[in-house]
Amino acid sequence: MKLTLPPLSLYIHIPWCVQKCPYCDFNSHAQKGIIPETDYIQHLLNDLKQDLSSHKDAIQDRKLHSIFIGGGTPSLFSAEGIAYLLENIQQYIAFEENIEITLEANPGTAEAERFIGYAQGGVNRISMGVQSFEPEKLLKLGRIHDNNEAVQAVGFAKNAAKNGLTSFNIDLMHGLPNQSVKQALADLERGIELSPPHLSWYQLTIEPNTMFYYRQPTLPDDDDLWDIFEQGHQLLIKAGYEQYETSAYAKKGYQCRHNLNYWRFGDYLAIGCGAHGKISYPDGNIYRFSKTKHPKGYMRGEYLYQQDPIELADRPFEYFMNRFRLLEAVPKQQFEAYTGLNEQIVRTTMDWALSENYITETASHWQITQHGKLFLNTLLEGFLD
């Protein structure tokens, strides 16, 4: 069985943040003392070299399609450190000519000079975790920035455009504790006023092992959540944004290429504490892997934590779990090329999905319907069989 190798991205995890937010289930650690920036960057580079060596047969002559530096709070690292990291990565693996390089930033750690430094160092996209513009909600969410700092950070991103920054994203959440429909829409309208090229608009969900899980706040009921989504969606469309994924809206030409590669079952190397990756081999094998979560173990040089094959039986679910988050049609040829499976393997499930009006189908594509979006989990369960 042969696979067509998909685009190859790189995820870099920087685990430190100023303080842990009560809703956050990411691998992040509150800053205690000075962050070992120089040492950690060296470990990231060593981790990458190890991956490039062990996955040499899978990587072949592929160039990096995108890089995403997430966390934690990557903007705690200096612009010089990020520039050094990117410069050295490029020594080890070539970049595509129009590579997208995103860095996550917390508005509470934003500085004009630092944003310009990131752009000059190779970052061409900033993603800012604003979450809300309402002081009371920011306090409840444990954010270290206020409303003014959020607006100021957007100004820094726009200013950095003169130095190579080509796009920026604002993360906003809705369905916050005790949030009314009116408050949620006011938050979104404030975000739209700032005119980011990309706006990620997520509903707050309570995840295990978070402070909110153990001390559950009062959240809006289902009727209010539906009104927030429906009215907010219309606001975004009216403002010229296109929804291309469940929680992602962008102006034309500003979709996040890195996330698109995730959702299209692309490959991604992953370095840093707790980072998760996926790699395909031409001979038909596909693996998911993760790195050591805690900085202490990781910085002893214990990088790889786990690596598991994606078995043939699991590939339909693995593929469509991400693919059906996108609103675009799914090419049947791409399903076969990236999974190594014949489309007939999912024929029974697709016939059932068609009968339930979860999808539509042409000779070359499958397309999830608006009805299917509402029953996405039910649709995906069909591929577990």
Image: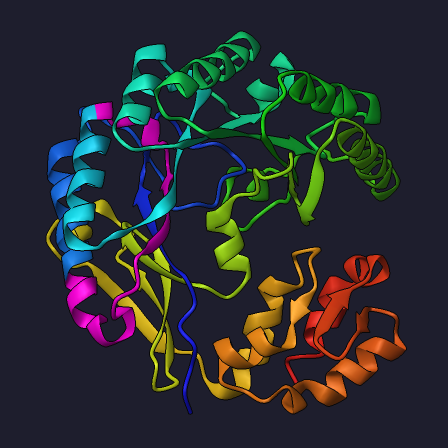
Residue 193 at x, y = what percent? Answer: 68, 16
The C terminus lies in quadrant: bottom right
Specify start and end residues of the magenta stretch as a single range.
50-79
Q: Relative to 95, does residue 368 appear above or below in the rendering?
A: below
Q: Which quarter of the figure has residue 362? A: bottom right
Q: Relative to 245, does residue 40 appear above or below in the rendering?
A: above
Q: Which quarter of the figure has residue 219? A: top right
- Say which residue appears at 50% left-offset and 79% top-offset: 337
| Left or right: residue 339 compared with residue 249 | left
| Left or right: residue 224 compared with residue 284 | right
The N terminus lies in quadrant: bottom left
Q: Relative to 104, does residue 99 appear above or below in the rendering?
A: below
- Say which residue appears at 58% left-offset and 29% top-offset: 197
Q: Which quarter of the figure has residue 321? A: bottom right
Magenta span contains residue 159: no
| Left or right: residue 161 compared with residue 187 | left
Residue 244 at x, y = what percent? Answer: 67, 48
Residue 291 at x, y = what percent? Answer: 28, 59
Q: Relative to 339, does residue 188 appear above or below in the rendering?
A: above
- Say which residue appears at 31% left-offset and 72% top-offset: 307
| Residue 17 visible to an observer of this rendering | no
| Left or right: residue 231 compared with residue 34 | right
Magenta span contains residue 63: yes
* Color theme of the render: rainbow
